[in-house]
Amino acid sequence: MRGIFSQLLITLHLVAVAQSSNLAQPSDKLTRAEYIEMYAPYAVKEMLISGVPASITLAQGILESGDGNSTLAQKANNHFGIKCHGMWEGKKFHMDDDSKGECFRVYENVFESYRDHSEFLSGRDRYAGLFKLRITDYKGWAHGLKEAGYATNPKYPALLIKIIEENELDKYDRMKTPPKGGEIPKDKGSKGGKHNTDNPQEAFVSTSQRQMYLRNDIRYVRVEEGDTYEKLERLTQVRKAQILRYNDKPNGAPLDEGELIYLQPKRNRNRGHDYHMVASGETLRWISQEYGILMKQLYKHNELNPGEEPIAGQKIWLRKRKKSEY
């Protein structure tokens, strides 16, 4: 009996030790600090491309994914709760949210989720007003997202601002290059490459696997053989009406192979050039596309009337002129 009692005590002791050991083991869940260190490079890279503040992207990722630990983040690499919507043709994950069995986008990796988040915001009219704000105005962005309908929670702006300020995420909005941390996946190749005007160092692949480029900090694609507006709409998740407006194309205008098509609004000025010397046959729209500048701004910078075209040899200003340049 004594032997059996002793054995029982030993067994209970071993069980207690095992339980204590399990409790002492670190959790598999990411901490907030780990999440920030891992994904800040993603947020900054996307900010430099799309203009969405890195602090906002990180705060949304933290809030929407529970520091990367939510079911949606773990099973679908979806860190922003972006739903399928009508044009999504990728993999899908269904779970209960506002309604039962809602459809959410699935990504191959977290970086694709960050990229799609940028494209989602920059490619929709209702968020266009946000891109007029300063990139350091995270409070304006937080309130603007709520007003544009990104979230239904009335406390959404306050939650984002609290996360940003408690973790000093606004420091990332002032960065010119991504910080060291989580490794950003290398971009894949593409079937394109006929046009050597595109800088391969600036090429990247969207979730649609169509190679995109960056000009004047604006995303664009090159039209390939067989492209239609409907095909570009499916591949880029940018609607036909937006494609036409962003590229100053009238409804019904054809797509020409090799043509540059912007997927975001053009800018007020070109950041790398002051002016362009017009060559024979060049139109103001061609200059607008070449430098990524709004047509209305080119008219304004050069005191031209709408519809007026420049002549060969004329200097077309790509920014507001100084008094000494008149």
Image (cartoon, rainbow, N blue to C red):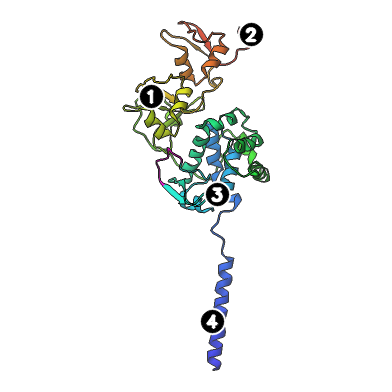
The answer for how far apart the CA atoms under marks 1 and 4 are is 73 Å
Q: Amino acid at mark 4?
A: Thr
Residue plotted at (55% across, 73% down):
18
Q: Earlier in the sequence, mark 1 or mark 2?
A: 1
Range drawn in magenta:
85-91
**Left or right: residue 229 compared with residue 56:** left
Q: Secondary structure at mark 2?
A: helix
Q: Is residue 231 left or right of residue 142?
A: left
Q: Amino acid at mark 1?
A: Asn
| Disc 1 from disc 3: Cα separation | 40 Å
Judging depth in this view, the residue of 85 and 219 nearest the camera is: 85
Residue in the picture at 54% in, 85% down: 8
Q: Residue at x 64, y 33 (%)?
A: 136
**How many numbered marks are there?**
4
Question: Within 10 angstroms of label 4, few (less than 14), some, or many (20 or more) residues?
Answer: few
The mark that comes first in sequence, 2 or 3, is 3
The three-letter amino acid code for the residue at tag 3 is Ser
Crowding around mark 1 (Cα neighbors within 10 Å: few <14, some 14 to 19, many 20+) is few
Asked whether residue 86 is drawn in magenta, I would say yes
Please report whichever mark, 1 or 4, sits nearer to the chain's N-terminal start: 4
Q: Residue at x 56, y 80 (%)?
A: 12
Q: Measured from the top left, where is residue 105 in percent x and y? A: 45, 45
Question: Residue 11, labelled with which disc?
Answer: 4
Specify whether residue 283 is in view: yes
Q: Residues within 10 Å of mark 3 (few under 14, many from 20)?
A: many
Residue 65: mark in rendering: 3
Please name the residue that numbered disc 2 is placed on.
324
Q: Position of residue 94 (x, y in %)?
A: 45, 50
**Which quadrant would residue 171 be assigned to in this image?**
top right
Q: Quadrant of the C terminus?
A: top right
